Amino acid sequence: MPKRIRTHVNPLGILKEHSFEGFGNDKNIMIDVGACKGEFTAALAVKFPEKNFLVFEIRVPLADKLREKFKDQENIVVFDGDAGRNFKSILTPCLEQGAIIEKIFMNFPDPWFKEKHKKRRFLNAKFLKEASESLDCKTEFIFQTDQQFLFDETLEMLKETGLVEVSFFKDPPFGIRSDWEQAKVKEGCDIWRMEFRYK
Ligand SMILES: C[S@@+](CC[C@H](N)C(=O)[O-])C[C@H]1O[C@@H](n2cnc3c(N)ncnc32)[C@H](O)[C@@H]1O
């Protein structure tokens, strides 16, 4: 089935909104949010050729490169723009086709240090609440970071929502280290990892 994506650019030219017709099948889906060069997704797709993949990258030039990288893989679809903004509209047709959103990877998301910029973090209480309308305990969220303060603040936020059950893990998922992780490990940084599901 061809990849069919429609992009609507709003009149202000600031926000891109996408719609997606789904993969046309009920295969399990994995999501990579903030994929950058896409090496993590590429490794996942080799390991799990029977699954579908949704890839989000806010920076358009990077997303264009990702599209080029995955152009021959019908089971991988790339979206540019803010992942949170388009999340529900992209997931809805997939869920209607019977697909399970198996894993959502948030690998080394931008920390947005300043207080006033915190709302730009993809994983925030508003997102979690909205996503709970579409997703349930079948979906596993994976959050990895080299920023301890971001890990702590995210954990605190998750606990405050009371929506999810959290656990921690030590090694890279499926033995795959993302590009960012490889660079940080070389620098000698520690990595913090957690997974969570809706209750
Ligand atoms: C620190 S990099 C990590 C890249 C990759 N996940 C890895 O681990 O190698 C964070 C990436 O997330 C992207 N990003 C940040 N906010 C985003 C958002 N709201 N939606 C989609 N991508 C986002 C950035 O453009 C950047 O490529």
Image (spheres, rainbow, N blue to C red):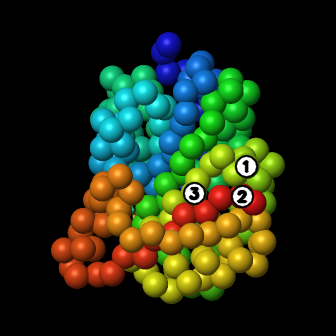
Give the residue displayed 43% in from the left and 76% down from the top: 192
Q: Position of residue 6 (x, y in %)?
A: 60, 27
Mark 3, secondary structure of its residue: strand
Give the residue displayed 50% in from the left and 21% down from the top: 3
Q: Is residue 166 above or below residue 99?
A: below
To which quarter of the image does residue 154 belong?
Answer: bottom right
Alpha-carbon span between mark 1 and mark 2:
5 Å
Left-right relation of 72 to 59: left
Q: Position of residue 80 (x, y in %)?
A: 51, 44
Alpha-carbon span between mark 3 and mark 2:
9 Å
* Quadrant in which ligand 1 is drawn: bottom left
Q: Is mark 3 within 8 Å of ligand 1?
A: no
Question: How dense is the environment of label 3, judged by Cα within 10 Å: few (below 14), some, or many (20 and up)?
Answer: many
Q: Earlier in the sequence, mark 1 or mark 2?
A: 1
In depth, the one of 12 and 157 nearer the eye is 157
Give the residue displayed 48% in from the left and 31% down from the top: 52
Extreme residue toward the left, this view: 186
Camera sees residue 96: yes
Amino acid beneath label 3: Phe
Amino acid beneath label 2: Tyr
Q: Which residue is mark 2?
A: 198
User: Which of the numbered marks, if any, corresponds to residue 141?
Assistant: 3
Question: How dense is the environment of label 2, judged by Cα within 10 Å: few (below 14), some, or many (20 and up)?
Answer: some
Q: Position of residue 155 (x, y in %)?
A: 61, 78
Extreme residue toward the top, this view: 1
Amino acid beneath label 1: Asp
CB atoms at circles 1 and 2 under 8 Å apart?
Answer: yes
